[in-house]
């Protein structure tokens, strides 16, 4: 095998690799001999087919397998011999005619272009200093969360007959809908409780009932939206003969033992304990996220090296596809929505470069400290991912087991968290108590 370096441009190198046809022939002969005992052909006893006959019948087909194997082996040898750390799959460009190679008439000759991971010295984590933001949970925060829970347990009580309905009130109604005087299927209900302002009915319906009293009867005239799910009603005007039985005002839930039982708790103390633990977990999680962001920002600022453009392009493409989908769906935030595509591309390419840079730095630091992912950790992540798709858990697990690249995507965040933990342990970290708003203050995009 002959390996010759042709070009070197930054992180990209190009090699010419040549494997003589005689070497291919030797591998072909070895493969035929290896398979001979398993070959069974008409006219020959099993395992006794002459190698010359196997070559005549299947030689070219077998040679294709040989060439593929040699291609993989030789390209890997070129990488090993030159001590390369590929940033992605090498690009292979065959120079020889493929048919002539498989026919044994030509050497296997190809160009291999490979982009390498840059050589750099990762910062010593013991030299780093960080401030970890912490927020202490007080009784006011706990009471506020319980009040939020109570708002989600809304109930309504009957108002006086003279009370006029306002937004936020509920009305107990009967109604019958018709179009051009003809009642339509699904357009009638009795004893229905409708919260005014909830937006659960056809646009305009709830607004028409603001100001009604118990005992009132009213024709509510509305037009079905053009995109209404029932095509036969879409865009049509309808009249709903409506009778109001009650106007009901919102009743605040009492935060007591009975309230706690709605959440499966024995009493209010048990609910308070559960809510406190949840809130403390939220605060700890946010504190960790803030510290992790500070660590990543510091690592980004401490390292400056050439990036493998193939990795950057792959990362940018993934990000940009997501941004385009959000733009088409009208879901970009105000700041991004005001930018041109060129400005957006520039911003998100910087993000892609940051992610690649940080990924390489974290990998280097983790390698130095012999950080690895255990099977138990990977299985835990796989089970957690599968649980996101109830009823399809087995299919999800099988998908990841059959797709090493997808499985690698589960490994990456576990590895990243373990390196962040390592840095946190070795760096100087001082705690600073801040208020909740400061802890949850949104960080800039980059």
Image (cartoon, grey):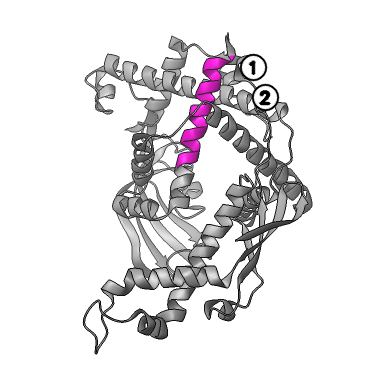
x 38%, y 73%: residue: 32
User: Where does residue 22 sit, x and y in percent of width and height?
Assistant: 54, 71
Circle 1 Cα neighbour tier, 10 Å, few/some/many (<14 / 14–19 / ≥20) = some
Residue 76 location, quadrant: bottom right
Q: Say above or below: 407 vs 231.
A: above
Circle 2 Cα neighbour tier, 10 Å, few/some/many (<14 / 14–19 / ≥20) = some
Residue 100 location, quadrant: bottom right
Which quarter of the rendering shows the C terminus? top right
Q: What span is colored magenta in the figure?
A: 411-427
Instruction: Based on the picture, tell me whether residue 397 belongs to the magenta stretch.
Output: no
N-terminal-most mark, 1 or 2: 1
Q: Say above or below: 58 vs 189.
A: below
Front position in the image: 247 or 372: 372
Residue 128 is tagged as 1
Front position in the image: 235 or 20: 20
Q: Mark 1 and mark 2: span between their CA atoms?
A: 8 Å
User: Where does residue 332 sit, x and y in percent of width and height?
Assistant: 64, 47
Residue 298 is tagged as 2
User: Where does residue 364 sit, x and y in percent of width and height?
Assistant: 59, 32
Mark yes or no: residue 54 visible: yes
């Amino acid at each position: 095998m002959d390996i010759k370096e042709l070009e070197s441009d930054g992180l990209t190198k190009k090699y010419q690799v040549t494997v003589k046809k005689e070497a291919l022939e030797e591998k072909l002969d070895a493969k035929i001999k290896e398979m001979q005992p398993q070959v069974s052909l008409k006219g020959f006893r099993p395992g006794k087919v002459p190698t010359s006959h196997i070559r005549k019948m299947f030689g070219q087909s077998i040679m294709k397998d040989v060439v593929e194997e040699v291609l993989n082996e030789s390209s890997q040898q070129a990488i090993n011999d030159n001590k390369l750390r590929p940033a992605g799959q090498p690009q292979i460009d065959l120079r020889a005619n493929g048919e002539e190679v498989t026919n044994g008439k030509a050497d296997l000759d190809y160009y291999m272009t490979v982009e390498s991971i840059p050589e750099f010295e990762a910062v010593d984590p013991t030299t780093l200093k960080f401030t970890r933001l912490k927020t202490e949970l007080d009784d006011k925060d706990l009471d506020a969360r319980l009040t939020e829970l109570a708002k989600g347990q809304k109930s309504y009580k009957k108002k006086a007959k003279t009370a006029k309905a306002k937004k936020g009130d509920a009305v107990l109604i009967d109604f019958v809908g018709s179009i051009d005087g003809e009642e339509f299927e699904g357009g009638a209900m009795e004893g229905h409780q409708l919260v005014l302002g909830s937006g659960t009915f056809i646009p305009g319906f709830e607004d028409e009932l603001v100001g009604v009293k118990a005992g009132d009867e009213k024709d509510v005239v509305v037009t079905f939206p053009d995109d209404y799910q029932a095509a036969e009603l879409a865009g049509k005007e309808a009249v709903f003969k409506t009778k109001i039985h009650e106007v009901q005002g919102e009743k605040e839930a009492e935060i007591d033992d009975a309230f706690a039982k709605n959440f499966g708790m024995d009493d209010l103390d048990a609910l308070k304990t559960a809510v406190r633990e949840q809130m403390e977990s939220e605060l700890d999680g946010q504190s960790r996220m803030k510290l992790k962001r500070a660590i990543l920002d510091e690592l980004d600022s401490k390292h400056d090296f050439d990036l493998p453009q193939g990795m950057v392009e792959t990362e940018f493409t993934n990000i940009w596809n997501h941004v385009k989908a959000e733009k088409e769906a009208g879901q970009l935030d105000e700041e991004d929505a005001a930018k041109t595509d060129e400005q957006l591309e520039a911003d998100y390419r910087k993000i892609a470069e940051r992610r690649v840079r940080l990924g390489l730095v974290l990998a280097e630091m983790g390698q130095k400290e012999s950080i690895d992912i255990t099977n138990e950790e990977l299985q835990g992540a796989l089970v957690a991912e599968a649980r996101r798709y109830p009823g399809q858990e087995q299919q999800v697990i099988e998908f990841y087991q059959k797709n090493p690249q997808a499985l690698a995507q589960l490994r990456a965040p576990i590895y990243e968290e373990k390196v962040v933990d390592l840095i946190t342990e070795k760096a100087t970290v001082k705690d600073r108590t801040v208020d909740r708003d400061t802890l949850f203050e949104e960080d800039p995009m980059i």
